[in-house]
Every structure is written in C-alpha cells, then in structure tokens.
Amino acid sequence: MELTLQSMATYWTGPEVAINLLVFMNLLGALLLGLVVGYERSYHGRAAGMRTYGLVCMASAALVVVPGFPGYWYGGHALALPSSDPTRVVQGIVTGIGFLGAGVIMKDGFNISGLTTAASLWASSAIGVLVGVGFYAAAILLTVLSATCMMWVSKIEGWLPSRPAVAVVLSFRQGYEPREEVLKRVAMERGYEIATGSFSIAYDNGHPEWRFVAVSLGKGKSATLAMLGDELSRFEGVEKYHLSHARN
C-alpha cells in the first residue's frame, strides 16, 4: 500500500478513534485493578509489588483485547484479515505467567516462600484477561476476592485450629552418637512429633547433622521457638542448632 497522507488519516477516523479509546479504557482499568491486588504484596515487602501486578494485569488485558478487533488492525488496511483466536492468546499468557511465578518462588531448606505471590500474579493475569474480553464486573469481583483473600485469610488461619511446623537442624559434637528414639521422645515431651519422611542425616568432619520437621500437636500444646532454643543450648551433645518456622 502506498504511504500517503490519506492512507495515514484512516488511522484517525471515527471508528478507529473509538476503538482506541475502548482499548485505552481497558488498559487503564486493568492497571488500576492490578495495583489494588499488588498493594498487599507491596505492603508486606514482597519482591513483586504494585508495579509488577499492575504491569501483569495491564499486559494481559492488552494481549486479549487486541485480537477482538482484527478488522481495525493497521488502520483497517490489513492485506488479509487475520484469523483471531483469543483462546490461544490466553494459553500463551498462562504459560508466560508460569515462568514469572517460578521466578518468585524460593526454597531454603524446609522453607518455601513465594507461593502466594506466584498464585496472586496468576490471579492478576486472569483479571487482565477478564477486562480484555469485556467481563468488567467479573474482573472487579475477582480483584476484590483476591485482595480479600491475601489480606484476611491468613488472619482466619490464625483463629482456626492448626499444627504449625518447625524446621530443625541439629549439629552434634564430634564423636557423639545421637539416637532417633531419644529425639522422638524429647520432641513429644515438648509437644511435637517428627514429620514422617522429613528426616535426613549428614556427616561432616566427624560431626553428625540431623535435619527434620517437627509438627506441633496443636496450638498451645507445644513449646515456642524461644523455649526450644533455650533448651537446645543446654542439650547434651548439641554443638549447633538452627530453628525456623517451616512455612510456604
């Protein structure tokens, strides 16, 4: 097609401007909804904050809304009308968000962090998809539900009965021979049981090292980390120890 002022003007006809305004409103709305969901992560100092969530939601909306108007691509001068299948775009978004989510998940020993951030990024992309296809009420509802879940469900979990777990690393002095049955008995006396399948043993320069997860018998029935640390500092044969909440 020859590039002339007349052909360029077709990009600014009434229908083209109307479609651009519609896309603009979709992108702006998706950005605002993404910022709402991302505020909770930003408030708690997570790696992915408002900017990340806003960009994910807005980009998802952009990728979905554009295939909805193939007749207006290139100012309506496409050499051939492109075949548009938004479902394929959604599949690509889901795959891309999977890679992004994997980047915020971190594993340190028995602790896994970032799962909630990864899941909420996925929800943010879904919000963008809903905005892109025009389900604005559903997008707003999903935003409210996602933000509510991230802010309040953890508090509800705190009220409900639970069995918190503690990741334990014990390094014994050289020549000391720890016994598993003694460890299990001592843990039970302090309100914990050793989680099945979590036990691992290492041997470094004559120092046995045991790693395991101790699961509480119930709220208020087990010793705190501070109490456990105080006892371990005086426990026979223990040279070093490391305690942390086994969380995700």
Image (cartoon, helix red, strand yellow):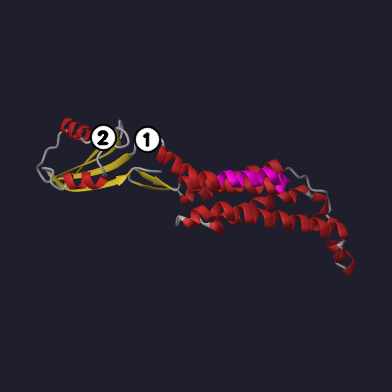
- Per the image, label 2 sits on a secondary structure element best described as strand
Q: Is residue 136 magenta?
A: yes
Q: Which residue is mark 1?
A: 162
Q: Was residue 239 drawn as part of the magenta stretch in this picture?
A: no
- Residue 141 location (% of width, % of height): 63, 44
Is residue 95 shown to the viewer in this render? no
Residue 128 x %, y %: 65, 49
Query: Closer to the N terminus: mark 1 or mark 2?
Result: 1
Query: What's the distance in space between the residues labelled 1 and 2, CA to CA?
Result: 13 Å
In the displayed structure, 34 sits above or below 209; it is below
On screen, residue 6 versus residue 158, left or right, reads right
From the top left corner, tell me how far across and down residue 131 is, in percent. Answer: 69, 48
> Which portion, as a residue range, is magenta?
132-146
Q: Nearer the viewer, residue 136 or 8?
A: 136
Q: Residue at x 44, y 43 (%)?
A: 155
Disc 2 designates what residue? 192
Q: Quadrant of the N terminus?
A: bottom right
